[in-house]
Image (cartoon, grey):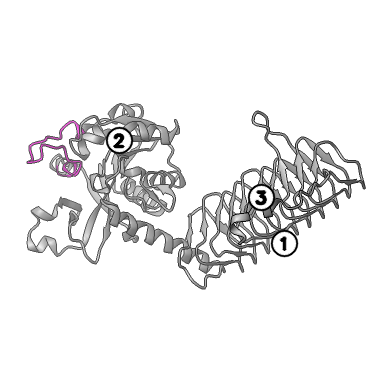
Amino acid sequence: MNKVVILAGGQGKRMKADIPKPLFKVLGEPMLEWVISACEESGLSDICVVKGYKGEMIDEYLNGRYSTVLQAERLGTGHAVMQAVPFLEKDTDGSTLVLCGDAPFIDPTAIKESLVIHKQQKNAVTVITAELDNPTGYGRIIRNENGISAIVEEKDATAEQRSIHEVNSGAYWFRTADLIELLGKLECTNAQKEYYLTDTIAIALSEGRNAGAYKSENPDIIKGANDRKDLLELNTYARMAVINKHLENGVEFTCLDGITIERSVKIGEGTEILSGTILRSGTVIGKNCTIGPNCVIEDCKLGDEVKLNYVQAYESEIDSGVKIGPWVHIRPNSHIKSGVKIGDFVEIKNSTIGEKTAVAHLTYVGDSDVGKKVNFGCGTVTVNYDGIVKSRCVIGDNCFIGCNTNLIAPVKLGKAVYTAAGTTVTHDVPDYALAIDRGVMKVNEGYSLRKLKSKLK
């Protein structure tokens, strides 16, 4: 069985944050997750992550999905892979892919095609490479008629070698049995006193084993992040790659200012995304919608012809033909059914809003089941929490909720119930009834004249 070892022990001091570098995010996902998902899409599931700095944070993120090993001391890439030897020894018949957890753009094509070359050439090690217009700072690939003869680091390269544009990506396929043997022969005789994984190539060649290279057509597999500027560049590249994909699929953008779309988001053709909109993981948007400006949508399912303007929506479902906004908050576990209209300064939480219901403005609907063709007057509140227990309201079809109505849950309104403005409903109301609750108004004449006497002169 083929294995994967992902090196994720880096601290990233120049990031100036107290987390492992592979957990810094690109388009909302840790760089480590990008690498893992590329492996999964390639059919590789036997994965070991080598953790180091703040390794407990790697464990917490993975939450048991894959095994981890600790590199307690940072003694080089070869030393990092050495920590995974017990993982490798469980099955030595296949090959092992070694990847960097902070190089997020390794792609399934490169992984699969390089494995084919690795097997066809019967290599002990196959380096995944790319050709860069500006290779400065990267190890150069020195090829010969049989494959590769060396990887030469920039500081050690001759002028002729520095003119080579094919560089090491830091990703390798090894025959697993060969990798275990080669790791055992690494030495830390360099100035840094570290074990370099690249030294395995020279050792393999000196022992008559094959070493080859697969050159990816995607130079972006090289991209990584050593500081916040690099991280911004990764996010900018990934952001535009996702937007370009949606453009090709018939999504409209007239201005890209402030637009961020995470890579798992799906958008139907004819939909327009306006400036300031953030679409996060798990979101699916139908056809011919208008989303924005300034919306945040996370893990929601939207039907066709939905219009959202200044809306934040989370973990909810919005059916076709719904119009919402501006300044609306849709909280988790809500279902907004077709034809609903929700206006400004409205919050919906853990509720179902029935077809063609109108919630025009200044209203809170929480923990409620609302029927179809209901009209909410402004200032309506479902009072769903008594400080200990959250309870639900049920509102029947065709109800008319007067302005400033308070529905004290649990309470049920039947069909076509009217509530008078200012009413506080504390018990169930039967079908077709009017609920009215107004105390006796008292008028204290001359009150303000007495109170404000000194100011009214």
- Farthest residue in the right direction? 432
* Residue 315 included in the magenta stretch of the image: no
Dot 1, crowdedness within 10 Å: few (<14), some or many (≥20)? many
Q: Can residue 222 be seen in this view?
A: no
Residue that appears at 83% across and 36% down = 427
Dot 3, crowdedness within 10 Å: few (<14), some or many (≥20)? many
The x, y position of residue 312, in whole percent, is 57, 54
Above-or-below relation of 90 to 291: above
N-terminal label among 3 and 2:
2
The numbered disc on residue 321 is 1
Q: Nearer the viewer, residue 37 or 22?
A: 22
* Cβ–Cβ under 8 Å for marks 3 and 1: no
- State which region is magenta: 182-202
Q: Nearer the viewer, residue 176 or 219?
A: 219
Q: Specify whether 75 is left or right of 57.
A: left
Residue 453 picture quarter:
bottom right
Q: What residue type is labelled 1?
A: Gly
| Residue that numbered label 2 is attached to | 176
Tag count: 3
Which mark is nearer the camera, 3 or 2? Answer: 3
* Residue 193 included in the magenta stretch of the image: yes
